[in-house]
Every structure is written in structure tokens, then in C-alpha cells.
Amino acid sequence: MALHTIPARRGLALAVKKGQHYKVINTHGYQIVDHWAFNADDPREFMSMEHCHVAIDKLTPVVGDSMVTNKRRPIITLMEDTSPGVHDTLIAACDIYRYQQLGAKGYHDNCTDNLAAALKALGVAQPETPCPFNLYQNTQYHAGKGFAYLPTVSKKNDYVLFRADMDAVVAFSCCPQDMVPVNSGNPTEAHVEII
Ligand SMILES: [Zn+2]
């Protein structure tokens, strides 16, 4: 077992083998963790939220559901979820443009740059920034009214456990969003445990 820290406002990428399990732990309870997965042999194949919606026939997976790639092949399977199961698969990763639109002056940490840095550290060529699987993100859509960006409903040390279904590079970003209250205004670290 190996415990890895995703530092507050930063990213992390790790290589996992087919069949390996990993936990994404919400250490402090209210942090969104953007999650991506890429085929280790060809990063142009990656976990795709749009394709997952068709594969699982839901907006977010439940235990036993496999998330799929843009080639519709299983890449990770949700094995356990100790949180209330509220996650998001619709909202793009935050980026400098989002923060500028919100009124940020100068640079603001963001999940898009965190993914790029994390993959670069592993020497993985990044094809694009896929829509992330936003673990613990509580964004609710109300027909006719739009999205409500709400604080997480997870608790300290809640975790989701995944199994890799192919050799993969899995990446994470502790979302630094502090201009919309999705991280309760205080972005924190989280942890990944490879089992
Ligand atoms: Zn973010």
C-alpha cells in the first residue's frame, strides 16, 4: 500500500496496473477532487464523461459501474463509495479563463494547469483536457433554472475505491475553486492510496 498526497490546489498523476485498486480519500471532507484516467499505452484514449453517460445509463456511477473511454472500453470501475454518492460528470475543469470571468486578477491556480503539470511530471503526452469526473462535487441541475454550485455533502475521510480495468495513468486535482463556494471556501489536500 502506498499513500500519496494531492496537495491543496495542486494535481497528482500515478501509473496503475490493470486490476490494481486505488482509493481517493476526501481527507478533510469538503474537497472536490477532479479525476481523469488515460490509457497508459495511448493517452489519446481516456475516460470520457460523455461516453460514460451512455455506458452506465446514469449521470454518475454507483458501485459496480464501469467508467469507459472515448473508445467505449472500461477503464476504471467504482468498487466502493463511503460518501453519499454525490459526484459530478457535467462540469468542465476549471481553468484560468473561468477565474478571469469570475473576476480574478492575475494568475489563479486551476485544475486544467494542474492536470498538465501532473502528466508532464510522469512524461505523459497530453492530448487535451477531457471533462473530469468531479469526485464529491455537488452541482445540481434544476430544469428551467440552471445549475446550483453547492458545498460537498461528503464527510471527513470519505473515500471512493476504484479498480483499474487497463494499465492506466490516473490523475487528480484538488480543485482550487475559492470564488464559488463548492469547496466551502477553503481548498484542502486530499489523498490517494494505491492498494
Ligand atoms: Zn477545479
Image (tube, rainbow, N blue to C red):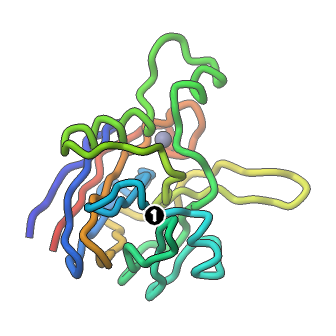
Residue at the location (32% across, 75% down)? 161
User: Along the horizontal axis of the image, is 35 left or right of 88?
Assistant: left
* For residue 161, above or below residue 38: below
**Residue 31: x and y, percent?**
42, 51
**Residue 118: x and y, percent?**
27, 41
* For residue 129, above or below residue 86: above
**Residue 140: x and y, percent?**
70, 59
Please tell me which residue lies in front, 3 or 112. 112
Q: Quadrant of residue 141?
A: bottom right
User: Along the horizontal axis of the image, is 100 left or right of 47?
Assistant: right
Quadrant (top left, top right, bottom left, bottom right) of the N terminus: bottom left
Q: Quadrant of residue 167?
A: bottom left
Please tell me which residue lies in front, 45 or 82. 45
**Residue 176: x and y, percent?**
43, 36
Residue at the location (29% across, 75% down)? 166
Please tell me which residue lies in front, 97 or 149. 97
User: Which residue does the numbered mark 1 point to in the structure image?
Assistant: 47
Please tell me which residue lies in front, 71 or 8. 71
Identify residue type, mark 1: Met
Residue at the location (52% across, 32% down)? 95
